[in-house]
Each structure stands twice: as C-alpha cells, then as structure tokens.
Image (spheres, grey):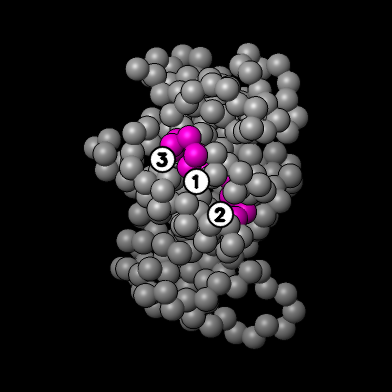
Amino acid sequence: MKTKIILCGACGKMGGNVLSLLEGDESAVAVCGVDLFPKEIGIPVYTDFTSVKEEADVIVDFSSAENLKARLEYAKTHKLGIVLASTGFTAEDLAMIDEYAQSVAIFKTANLSLGVNLMQALCKAAAQVLGEQFDVEIIERHHNLKKDAPSGTALMLADTVNEAFEGKKRYVDGRSGIVGAREKSEIGMHAVRGGTIVGEHEVMFAGEDEIITITHSARSKRVFAAGAIRAAKFLRGKGAGKYEMKDLLAEEN
C-alpha cells in the first residue's frame, strides 16, 4: 500500500522536486497539495487545509515557518504524521512543535540529506578527538533568496559540535570591527548568500599549524526531496513523538 502524502508548498521548487521523484515511486504518492499560490501541477492544490478532501497518511511540509500551527492542528485532528522540511523556526515555534509532538508524529530535521547527517556524525567525532586545542568555525553558503541566517543546518552542526564540549561553547555570528582575540569558548558562524548556491556547509577545526575541514555541498535540491519522501514513508503509522534522520537510518539499517 502506498504512503499517501499531502504536499504543503506543492507549487514551489521543492514541491516540484518531490512530485518529480514520486512519478517513479511505487510506494508513495502525493494525493493533493496545499499552496498559497496554486497552479496546475497534476494533483489537486488548495490554498489552505480547510479545503482538503483527500485521505492521507503524512503531510510533507516544504512551505515556510509561517502558519505552522494550522499544519500541526490539521495533522493532529486527522491523525497524520508530518514531515517539517522547512527551517527558520522561532523559539515559540519550537515550543509549539514539542507540544504537538505529544499527540502527533513529527519528523523534524534541519537537513534531509543523507550526506549532511553523516557529516554531523563526523563533526562530533572530530570535536571529541581534537578538543579545546582546535578552534571551530562554521561557514555556510546559500542562494540569494534564502531568508534565515545562519542556516538551520549550520546551527544543527554547531549544536552537534557543542555536545562534545557539554554545551559550553557560545555562537558568534560573524565578526566586525575591533572584536579582540578569539576566545576558546566561541564557535564562529558565518553566512554567505549569493547566486543559486543550493547549499554548502564547512566545519573548520583550526589548530596550531594544521587545519581540518569537513564539508558538504548539495548540487541539487533533489537530495532534500528524496530525503523528505524517505521520511514520509518512515513516519507512516508511527506513534506520537519527535523523530529525526538518525531514527530513520537506524530503522533502515
């Protein structure tokens, strides 16, 4: 039986990538879409969830952090899982997600790429081995239309590195002016915006006379669409709670 998906943000670029991949998928299908600016994309598209008639198993949300409550409430009312594939959530949004996770199966990750999640594990291992002798700086690069900075993935990587330091590091967003010598307690965060860069992340460990860098470059948005489809299949039938890529990978392996 196919996993039935409601695709939120269906008419955007990521929605198009998801639909393209689903064309050849024998175990998942998009039954309808929700988008503020509907257009003909081969499935019914509604401007909001109140108009949705189709039965589904999972919502895949590639819209934005805005109007999050409406999507979570629909998932709760109709007993659907929801894959939150957008970023830029506020502290209030994150608290809301935690609240709804008590009654909804929520898959949330800052990055749906398998490669980024491997990078996350490598960065944590490097931080544990290198310790305080190496300074950590994170550089992320994205297209000129991205609204939030640092990226959700950069923050995820910073949090992962910080776990090795028991959460004692503080994040410094860029540097300007006479800021003084770099402190050991810092993790530098630097955002670059330009052109059509899909997404690049670099974690640099700089020590005395040597530098180690761990990098990931997404060459197409299709890697995120593929990850979202995998997450939707994983989430179908799951009980309430928060899930992430490591849960999916553990089940698959």
CA–CA distance in space, label 2 to label 3:
15 Å
Residue 114, disc: 3
CA–CA distance in space, label 1 to label 2:
8 Å
Asked whether residue 3 is drawn in magenta, I would say: no
Q: Quadrant of residue 11?
A: top right
Asked whether residue 80 is drawn in magenta, I would say: yes
Q: Which residue is mark 2?
A: 152
Residue 93 left/right relative to 35: left
Q: Is residue 108 above or below residue 7?
A: below
CA–CA distance in space, label 3 to label 1:
8 Å
**Amino acid under label 2?**
Gly
Q: Quadrant of residue 248?
A: top left
Q: Which residue is mark 1?
A: 111
Residue 139, disc: none
Question: Which mark is first along the chain, 2 or 1?
Answer: 1
Give the number of the mark in front: 3 or 1. Answer: 1
Residue 148 in picture, x, y percent from top left: 67, 54
Is residue 216 visible from the viewing direction of this image?
A: no
Magenta residues? 75-89
Residue 229 in picture, x, y percent from top left: 45, 30
Residue at horizontal 63 percent and vertical 18 percent from the top: 44
Is residue 36 visible from the viewing direction of this image?
A: yes
Residue 75 in picture, x, y percent from top left: 50, 39
Give 103 or 86, whichever is nearer the viewer: 103
